[in-house]
Amino acid sequence: MRARRLRTGLKGWGGVGAMAVGCALAVLFALLLPLVRSHGESGGPEAGHGLAHGSATRAAEECADPEKQTLAPSGADGPTIDEIRGREGEKRKLIVGVDQNSYRWGYRDPNSGGDAELEGFDIDLAHRIAEDILGDADAVQFKAIPTNQREPAVQDGRVDMVVRTMTINCARLEKVAFSAPYFRTGQQLLAPKASPITGYDESLAGRSICTAAGSTALSTLEQDREDGRLAADADLGTTVPNQLDCLVRLQLGEVDAVVTDGALAASQAAQDPTVQLKGDPFTTEYYGVAMKKDADDLVRRVNRILEQWRADRTDGWQSSYDTWLSPTMGDDPARSEPPAPEYLRRS
């Protein structure tokens, strides 16, 4: 497989009565204006924002088991796949949003020299999808996407999909469609070995914690602090575009700890022997491939590819795990394999 090589008028009313009515209308308008605006009817640049946000919030509150909100696998073609295949010449490629700074997930090996190609676990999966859809594992155009631009990149059509350690969650399901899970992880803490921080516990009181903007880590910590599961004086003010920037902030002493997916934290600890994982993961989450919400044919196809990838014991999920992740996560992949996928009953 490819892994083995380098890789968003009052007129007429008269007198005091008219004035009184006018004043009453003015007061009523002033009272109603914020409500009208909050429902997106002001016509300004923020039109629709209040309503959309409210709908998204309600939908997120009603959502359960986001990792199961995907379509059943299918090998049938459709409009999205046809569009990808219809690209001509050098543009006939699958356009995939990835990371290029996540060690062993999507990165360029600094020791390979020259123009090192992207490689890693996510990169293997992207090549596998391209091979199935276009018949060529190398027919991929990779686009480096910051953490906080993953959903907009899909929504705006800058990429066909994002394969970038992206957690499936309810809020994101309002913006993009996800495949079935292809990896299981959980939020975990990274701190200097010499730090008195012991894990996701009271030792974080008064500590500054770095997270990536738009990440599950940030939303989890904000909710936990509001609910009292995280110390009220924990400082969450440091956010960065890309997760690796948090490691740099930690190395510079600008923050006390980093919270990110345990899979990424393990890779960062492997890059810097002065830091380590502190405590156990405190959530359970799943990575999925993100696509446009109306790209049903592509979602189904990717789900079929994932089933085949996991079943392939020669050059599939297990092989990619052994190549890229076992050095940082251990030889037993059982805790990282997602459960058997469950799909929506929608036809």
Image: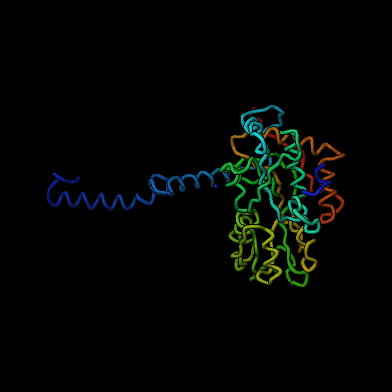
Colour approach in the figure: rainbow
Up-down relation of residue 241 to residue 250 (above or below): above
Q: What is the total number of numbered labels drawn onto the structure image?
A: 0
**Foreground residue among 111 and 3:** 111
Query: Residue 39's quadrant in the figure?
Result: top left
Q: Residue at x 68, y 69 (%)?
A: 256
Q: Where is residue 77 shown, x and y percent of the image?
A: 67, 28
Q: Where is residue 236 shown, x and y percent of the image?
A: 61, 64
Q: Residue at x 31, y 53 (%)?
A: 30
Horizontally, residue 41 falls left or right of residue 133, namely: left
Residue 66 seen from this side: no
Q: Where is residue 254 shown, x and y percent of the image?
A: 65, 71
Q: Where is residue 331 shown, x and y percent of the image?
A: 87, 51
**Foreground residue among 79 and 301:** 79
Residue at the far left: name it. 15
**Foreground residue among 101 and 42:** 101
Residue 151 seen from this side: yes
**Foreground residue among 131 and 258:** 131
